[in-house]
Amino acid sequence: MITVWVALLVGLGVMSGVVKNKTDNSLVLPGTGSNTAQELLQRSGAAQAGDADQIVWQVGPGHSVTEPAIQQRISAMLTQVSHLPEVASVAGPYSPGGEVQLSSDKRTAYATVNFTQQADTLNHDDVKQVISTATAAREPGLAVELGGAAIESVQTPPSSTSSAIGIAAAAVILFVVFGSLLATALPIVTAVAGVGSGMLLVSPLSHVMAVNGVAPVLGALIGLGVGIDYALFILTRHRRGLESGLDPERSTVEALNSTGRAVLFAGGTVCIALLGLLTIGVGFINGLAVPAAMTVVCTVIASLTLLPALFGVFGLRVLGRRRRRALLAGEQGRAESGQGAWARWAQAVPRFAPVLATVGLAAMLLIASPVLHLKLGFVDASNDATSSTSYKSYEMLADGFGPGFNGPLFLVSEVHSPADQAALDRLDTALATVPGVAAVQAPPAPPAPAAGGSAIEVAQVLPKTAPQAQGTSDLINHLRDSVVPEYADGTALKVYVGGVTASNDDFAAMTNAKLPLLLVTVVGLSFLLLLVAFRSLLIPTLTALLNLLAAAASFGVLTAYFQWGWGTRLFGQGAASPIMGYMPEIVLAVLFGLSMDYQVFLVSRMAEEWSHSRDNTRAVIAGLTHTARVITAAALIMIAVFAAFSLTSQRDVAEFGVGLAAAVALDAFIVRTVLVPSVMYLCGAANWWLPKWLDRRMPHLAIEPPAGGAVTAPGGVRDLTDSSVNS
């Protein structure tokens, strides 16, 4: 099996190198005005169909960009840029009609570089050539910077450092838990093999479907977290089997027959939750969900095949010397003997259940309260590193023209007749007087379209407010709902508001509208799975409610950290910004999947005790005593991995990291170890009630091993300490 895995990774590596990864970050939003505008531009072959970036230059006080020496130097540079590969056109301030590209104090100016393609499909070397050509015009007293989507795409740093930090932090936690270097290495090797195979499969997948450029990072983030956790659960079960007196082979079989089933179930729930994102119907999100789910599948396969093979190689050495000596001396660990901090906590829960439930609920509601102010949107260059050229150009434009110049809107018109053209001319004239509009750039009207034909015209509208500001969203809505209909009424003229800012605004609105469907899908599937697994109505209902509460709390953290800027200011991560428009869907899907892991792990141990004793109090205590240590250790590993990604300069990856780290921390340390046991104690035997007619009609899903398959310790005593370390 180890040979198969080595060959698989080598083969996938060779294939990935041959096939190459083909990323697609295009934002296709069917039925929206911004998407129609983009389609019209692409169909007409207009230069604006590609990405529009800016070259910005600024001179010191007492000087002007119109000085002959400055004008000559910049004009020569702009001419060079216009002849570079993938550059469709360059519109500068020194051409007739370009005066609007000069600031009022004549110290700042910009040129618009129209590329032939959108930013995600441009060759990075071509974009870098534009940057190097433009910045070569710098001289003392003359600053030249560049901004735009294409420029930002080539300055995003790789996330390999975050992965390394996350793995190192996980290794430290594993060593503390196991006290053995070998036991520490096994989950990491297994997770890296699973994540590596999943990421290598992204290259061929990218030729079958559109795969987002962030997909490998998200896959690594989720895959490392769940992969190490799944291996940890199986390894923990295997070590306990060895300590109960089983030989390594028998212990491995029992670990797979119990925890292996649970890992398969848990991995399936994570994949179902991720694939639930397909209900949103946006290719951009599909390109994140499918690769992430594929990586989770690979980590599950590695946990169920590679890890047991490693058990066969190392035998009793997975215990470490101290544990092997203790085993020979007949000693038992504190967790297995019902002692230790978590055992004492489990005994305290029934005594203080009402207080714990109240305090836990109040804490979660308090943490979730900022979510009431959640604003979805997209980041812009103001959130980039202050040393980047995109950030500097943003500041120069904001200083010279106002923040709205960093988020231009494009009014794309389809003209069919002279009457349409006359209406469009009146609209172009009126746009400059619309509240919230700083400037309008409308090109000369083209020749009238032939009979039965149409012409495409584009006007650039510059808002007074920044792309992230609510005022810009209000302007987009005002143009669409009031201004355009007023002038197009009674004609065949069609005018669509497009551009990156409008697309982002439409994306946030679309994801908001689809969020209820995603919630119904993910919560409904989770409910059904737990209903079948535990034959209970109350447990899946409680799980759904607490998962929703945990999700709200995690978004409360995100809102305070990024939108209010509490965390970004503390860690020097740039200015505050709205939460990325697709973040709720991704975090919700992953959170529900991971929460199911911990819930199944905890409640299945309770269910086992209930099936033997029919004592709910004993079931709650036993479940918490024998699973809390592993749950919290697994959670700490996930938090470490996710937190490592939270400090990256790439804002969407940082939001993934913070959101998922907060979600796991709240889920493990408040929901699963405080709220679930205290509420289940208060509910008593009602936890396990299911109408008989429903029980007869439901299929049986065996998370636990078949009867008689439990571990038997020496002397025939059934090991109740952890007969299935479920995930």
Image (cartoon, grey):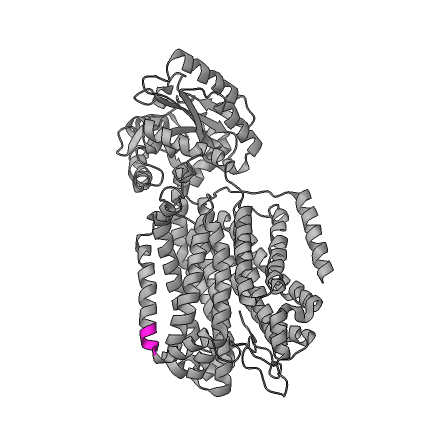
Pick the quarter of the image with the N terminus: bottom right
Is residue 123 visible from the viewing direction of this image?
Answer: no
| Location of residue 556 (image quadrant) | bottom left
| Main secondary structure type of the part rendered in magenta | helix
Tell which of 477 and 574 is nearer to you. Answer: 574
**What is the x, y in percent for residue 613?**
48, 87
Q: Which residues are magenta?
A: 352-356
Q: Is residue 683 left or right of residue 638?
A: left
Residue 717 placement, left or right of 551:
right
- Which residue corresponds to the image point at 63% horizontal and 75% vertical from the top-left? 325
Q: On the picture, is 34 further left or further right than 252?
A: left
Residue nearest the viewer, comparing 584 with 645: 645
Can residue 504 be seen by looking at this rendering? Answer: yes
Q: Position of residue 486 (x, y in %)?
A: 28, 35
The structure residue drawn at horizontal position 64% and vertical position 78%, both measured from the top left corner, is 328
Instruction: Name which residue lies at 43% across and 74% down.
Output: 539
Q: Who is closer to the viewer here, 272 or 621?
A: 621
Q: Which residue is located at x 31 percent, y 71 percent?
A: 358
Q: Is residue 492 magenta?
A: no
Residue 271: percent from the left, percent from the top? 54, 60
Q: Is residue 439 left or right of residue 244?
A: left
Residue closest to the eye, 394 or 525:
394
